[in-house]
Amino acid sequence: MKTYRLLSLSLFFALLSCGTGNRNQEAPLLYVPEELEVSLWASSPLFHNPTNMDVDAKGRVWLTEAVNYRDFRNADGHLVREAGDRVVILEDRDGDGKADTSQVFVQDEDLRSPLGIAVVGNQVVVSCSPHVIVYTDTDGDDLPDSKEVFLTGFGGKDHDHGLHAGQLGPDGKWYFIAGNAGPHRVEDKEGWTLRSGSVYNEYTPYSTENVPAQVSDDGKVYTGGLIIRINPDGTGMEVMAHNFRNAYEVFVDSYGNMWQSDNDDQTASCRTTWLMEGGNAGFFSEKGDRTWQADRRPGQTIAEAHWHQHDPGVLPSGNVYGAGSPTGMLRIEGDELGEAYRGLLLAADAGRNIIFGYHPRPEGSGYSLANRQNFIASVDTDNEGYIWHQVEADTSKWFRPSDASLGTDGSLFVADWYDPIVGGHQMRDKGGEGKIYRITKKGRNYASPSIDFGTISGQVAALCNPAVHVRARAAQLLREQGAAVIPQLEPLLDHVNPFYQARAIWLLAEMGAPGLEKVRPLLRDKNPELALTSLRAMAAVAPEALLGEASTLISEAHPLVRREWALLLRKLDYEKTAPLYSQLIEGFDGTDPWYRYALGIALSDQANEVFEREWKNTDPLAWSAAQASLIWELHPEAAIPALIHRVHSESLSPEERLQALETLAFIPHNEAVETFLRLAKGEGILAEQADWWLQFRKYNEWQDFLVDWEPPLDNLPAPQPELLVALDQLSDSLGTMAAQQDALNRLVESPEGRLHLAFLAVKGSLADSLKTQLPEEWSTEGRLAVRSLLTRLFGTEQHLDEAGINQLAGDVTNGKVLAARNCLACHRIGDSGNEIGPYLSGIRQKMDAPTLVNAIVQPDAAIGFGSESWLIRLKNGAALYGLLQSNGPVVTVLDSQGQRFVIPASEVAEKRQVPVSLMPKPAEMGLMAQDIADIRAYLMQGDL
């Protein structure tokens, strides 16, 4: 029996009374709907830096701490736990509505910034890249007796974009979500290996090179962040959706729907989305080898390009709500907060100091999230611009909701990371503070229920509990007993709450023929979400049994259910399902993007067969809008002649001809390419579009077809053979000192030679004896970003006093002049400038004034995602310094001067990520403290 520690209540309140900040005492703890009330349930030092929560059958709150979050960057002056991060249990033992005890369940060196926890029975499942760890408490003393690494191989150790929380779904399987900090190489207990990667790389002490286009054992390429589903015994792993940026948590509701919020790439494009099984969420290119910036087409908005919304094979983006830092997800399925909140989807956003509420509504074959509400917030008005002004004084804006969980009594717990800043891998709260709030309905008595897992009736009651993994444990126990529990489960099918009905449906479907017979009539239920659940549950155990009446069911079904038929039938032999797919295709109205995409997921592998079956004998000029849209989605090679006919037909509208051209652009076939080559020689919009596509495709999907075609903008850097000679001389250990000195001088005098020297320094291949001969001042280097790099590698840096700058008043007028002179070379402000760095017109949506000053004075401290700098050395002796926008058969580099180079990978000798920002430090730009204050004043005013 291991001992444990309890923090005394008196110590807790003594320390709490000394809290930091000077928040307005008249403001409420949090803003919540009028009929609800909020209380502070727990706070530091009972725990620190909470990242994720769960609630056990005793009503206790379990949470993961991330005190050691990126301590390679944040440890200076911060709380650090040398023995590893912790899992903590909080409990309200005296029933007064506040936690009074805190116990450490485990502290483990393998826990470095864990981001997920699930408590199911005596097992505690913790997500912490690279592992999913299962701690088991066999003797019930609230301390682990065993530890098992359930899964391993996730990228993103000590990284926000690593492995996040897991949930045991209503189907009895685990769902885990991970961000795009790959590579992810995960093997299940049967040896099936998942491989996922992308072009996203970030320098950390733990990172390995993330590479795109990795093939998993099912022959598919999965990209970036993803969701996996796996059996509780570790077998049967499968990818449910992929190509996220950094979705923090997935919530699987009782219907089997997956919900997530995904972070943006500093573009005010965060989104909340219902996820379709098999979906590609569209952050990177299909194989992960290009960023959204590299794929952005003329005329596309940032949000459209950011999520590849005009590409076939991509999930509709859902509710794009702007700037933010999305975190925890939850769906309220009971009435404990009030019947009006049944079904409410909660999406926490730490950046906006808010938890959004959505009432998902079936719309066509998908879900509308149009009516977003501000459900919980620390500010009285949602800062849609993500403004953090004077954050050091206004501690209400330190509310950083990381998670939300329901208690066994139905009360809502909200974990608050509590920090002046969120994002950029930073934290400024040096004490590791955290809070947990409890939200309840006014006037309601929240008595903690006694959970009885020992009887069938108790298990059925627990199946209706609001706490996600309490009901999941009940489902496990009921599932183990099989058909014997059908009589006790069957009454739930008539319950007034459809979520309870859905939970019973999943279990009954697994109980053999008697259970399936109870579920089968519900395939025709008037509630489409119950019919959807019944279809999913039956397909999970007996998909072949559905085929007999599939045609009739499809003809009667709501679009929501027909969409699910399209997805489920893809797992069966197409020869058997082809007539059913003809029926489903006939039901497409031409406007429902979810329905179209479901057919695309289902039929992409048989695209040519589908075209031959459905449209081969149809006049291409007579295609309906629905037919043209589906053919765009599938873009089969078999359609090429018909598409060419449509492109050239003047009887069609310009929009129809352009759609046909765009469809051809996604077909890697010589006949399609030849069409573009011919069109590009003409005039008009078709010629302009053809020319753009040729230049875009030359170094990706059409590379093999365009080897001999030279685009007008093909700008491979000029060869520098003399630099190769100098590099050989410099590295020649048998050469004379004079020859080495001569080579060094030639490299110093050449603009690209200086980049070669930087490359050698970053690699650690430049001898100290040679470094000492390099100049400390690089004033003759005209490229500011390069000058800054050389200074940081070889010179002496100058430092400015941030605190002093923050005290200075700024001059907006002078700041505008200085910003135009110094910022527009890399950033856009309004319609002016370049797109190398983040947009500055909306920078006030992403950071407060002190954070902006920090970003200017210390640009290396928090390099933005996608803004990591790279040195690229070419085989022809040229060298580049800039942003890596694609990495694969083609390497796309946006250099520090804003020129884009598209280079065959075969021409690249070597590339290295540099832990230095492209943004020069103020000294390299000649900026003084007052200048920075003036720029700050200009950029932090209203929209620019």
Image (tube, rainbow, N blue to C red):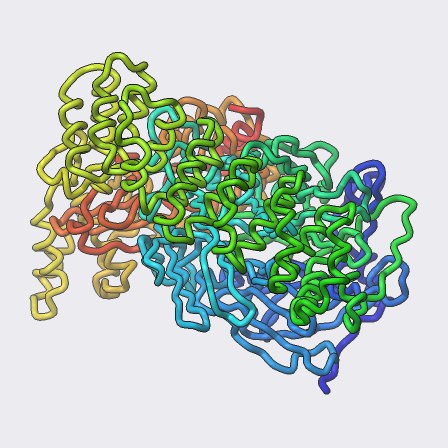
For the question of whether residue 361 can be seen, the reply is yes
Where, by quadrant of the figure, is residue 742 drawn?
bottom left
Q: Quadrant of the N terminus?
A: bottom right
Q: Residue at x 18, y 15 (%)?
A: 683
Where is residue 121? Give x, y as percent.
69, 71
Q: Using residue 845 as the reference point, say whether residue 497 is left or right of it.
A: right
Q: Nearer the viewer, residue 3 or 424?
A: 3
Instruction: Tell me where residue 93 sits by quadrant.
Output: bottom right
Q: Residue at x 53, y 46 (%)?
A: 801
Residue 296 x %, y %:
35, 33
Q: Residue at x 32, y 47 (%)?
A: 605
Left or right, residue 437 beside residue 145: right
The residue lying toward the viewer, choosing from 879 and 179, is 179
Position of 823 relative to 119 (above/below): above
Q: Nearer the viewer, residue 201 or 878?
A: 201
Residue extending furthest toward the front: 548
User: Horizontal and vertical percent for residue 222?
Assistant: 38, 53
Q: Kindly identify the residue that appears in the image at 37 percent across and 63 percent down.
A: 208
